[in-house]
């Protein structure tokens, strides 16, 4: 399948993906409800591009990434279609053994390198472990590949025999990236890969990811809550709220001409590079609703300053905004609202 608007090939297509967690209570742990962490998410990522996935904590963005990879449980429903050898494969229906070769195509960089690296293993064993899991038994070949990966992320082979605690946070994340790259994946899911790092180190890791993408032709799903980081690395951006995507567009279109009130509120909170620019920060009233009991109609309407009666009774669909090809928003009034985006001077 190719994206008709660009002629490029689609590597990953997610269709109506849902991940619901049971709420159990009582002595017999009876299921009394469901937490709808991901509730009908659909998007595509073209080969070689970066799709940023943003939203508040608890919106379901990390669960979306994990559901695609089938980490920590299976999706409740939906399809995850990965293009392999010219055809789309629905990996959600595969058994553990059938899934194994496709895991080479998709890897993940976790948020906290301190937690994702085994403290009892050396760097050589950490980075080489995916090769061993995939059946490689030649120790020399694994070691040579580990050396290659260390150099590709800016570390030296002399680091191989050290343990994770002997490295800084930025170096540990580089080790995590090397581990993700060792199987030559096509898709890398980056789950808030810089949020646990100092600001100065964040820029270095982002530049490394961009350089690796250009060199290897990788495709990224970049999960984050920092809008400024997402703007810097993403070709397109999807905004999530309470388990659903509420807006998706090119990075430029979304940042400078948002069509959903929630995206406008997120953009208003981004620090301005120019101290002379003082935009109004939109304060959202109340807390994020309980995903086990979402509001009727539009899920954002209890916190939306533009909400009308229609918003309270009818849930809007994610549809293309008139006159804006490729720009989709789940808002009844996306065509008529005049929302404020980022000032041009803050573009990075």
Image (cartoon, rainbow, N blue to C red):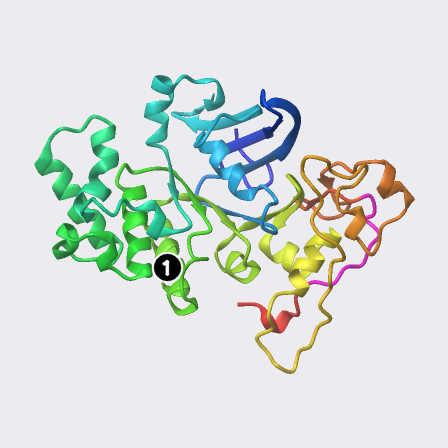
Residue 333: within the magenta?
A: yes
Residue 216: within the magenta?
A: no
Work out which residue is located at the far left of the displayed protein and give it.
Answer: 140
Identify which residue is drawn at 20% across, 26% down.
Answer: 135
Horizontal relation, residue 209 to residue 299: left or right: left
Q: Quadrant of residue 197?
A: bottom left
**The magenta segment:** 332-341
Q: Position of residue 175 (x, y in %)?
A: 27, 51
What kind of secondary structure does the magenta stretch mostly adopt? loop
Q: Residues within 10 Å of mark 1 (few under 14, many from 20)?
A: many
Which element carries disc 1, helix, strand or loop? helix
> Is any part of residue 10 visible from this angle?
no
> Is any part of residue 119 visible from this angle?
yes
Q: Note whether 14 is above or below 124 in the view shown.
A: above
Work out which residue is located at the far bottom of the displayed protein and give it.
Answer: 276
Identify which residue is drawn at 72% across, 48% down.
Answer: 324
Horizontal relation, residue 206 to residue 51: left or right: left
Q: Quadrant of residue 27?
A: top right
How many badges with numbers are in the image?
A: 1
Q: Note whether 201 is above or below 216 in the view shown.
A: below
Q: Nearer the viewer, residue 305 or 47?
A: 305
Work out which residue is located at the far front of the displayed protein and give it.
Answer: 27
Q: Nearer the viewer, residue 336 or 300?
A: 300
Q: Quadrant of residue 16?
A: top right
Q: Which residue is mark 1?
A: 205
Q: Position of residue 343 (x, y in %)?
A: 66, 70
Q: Position of residue 76 (x, y in %)?
A: 57, 24
Q: Position of residue 184 (x, y in %)?
A: 29, 38
């Amino acid at each position: 399948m190719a994206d008709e608007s660009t002629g490029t090939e689609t590597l990953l297509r997610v269709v109506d993906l849902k991940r619901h967690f049971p709420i159990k209570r009582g002595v017999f742990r009876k299921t009394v409800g469901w937490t709808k962490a991901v509730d009908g998410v659909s998007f595509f990522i073209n080969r070689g591009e970066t799709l940023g996935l943003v939203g508040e904590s608890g919106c379901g963005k990390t669960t979306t990434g994990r559901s695609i990879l089938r980490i920590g449980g299976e999706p409740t429903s939906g399809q995850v279609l990965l293009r392999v050898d010219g055809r789309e494969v629905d990996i959600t229906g595969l058994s553990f053994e059938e899934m194994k070769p496709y895991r080479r195509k998709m890897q993940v960089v976790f948020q906290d390198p301190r937690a994702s690296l085994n403290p009892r293993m050396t760097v050589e064993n950490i980075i080489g472990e995916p090769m061993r899991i995939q059946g490689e038994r030649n120790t020399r070949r694994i070691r040579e590949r580990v050396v290659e990966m260390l150099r590709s992320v800016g570390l030296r082979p002399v680091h191989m025999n050290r343990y994770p605690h002997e490295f800084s946070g930025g170096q540990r994340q580089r080790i995590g990236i090397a581990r993700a790259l060792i199987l030559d994946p096509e898709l890398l899911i980056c789950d808030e890969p810089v949020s646990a790092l100092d600001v100065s180190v964040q820029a270095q890791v982002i530049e490394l990811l961009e350089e690796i993408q250009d060199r290897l032709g990788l495709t990224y799903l970049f999960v984050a809550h920092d809008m400024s980081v997402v703007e810097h690395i993403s070709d397109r951006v999807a905004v999530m709220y309470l388990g659903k995507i509420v807006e998706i567009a090119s990075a430029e279109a979304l940042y400078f001409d948002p069509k959903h009130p929630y995206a406008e509120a997120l953009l208003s909170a981004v620090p301005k590079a120019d101290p002379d620019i003082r935009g109004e920060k939109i304060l959202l009233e109340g807390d994020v609703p309980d995903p086990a009991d979402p509001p009727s109609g539009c899920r954002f309407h209890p916190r939306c300053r533009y909400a009308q009666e229609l918003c309270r009774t009818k849930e809007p669909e994610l549809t293309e905004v008139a006159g804006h090809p490729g720009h989709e928003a789940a808002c009844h009034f996306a065509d008529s609202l005049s929302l404020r985006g980022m000032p041009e001077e803050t573009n990075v």
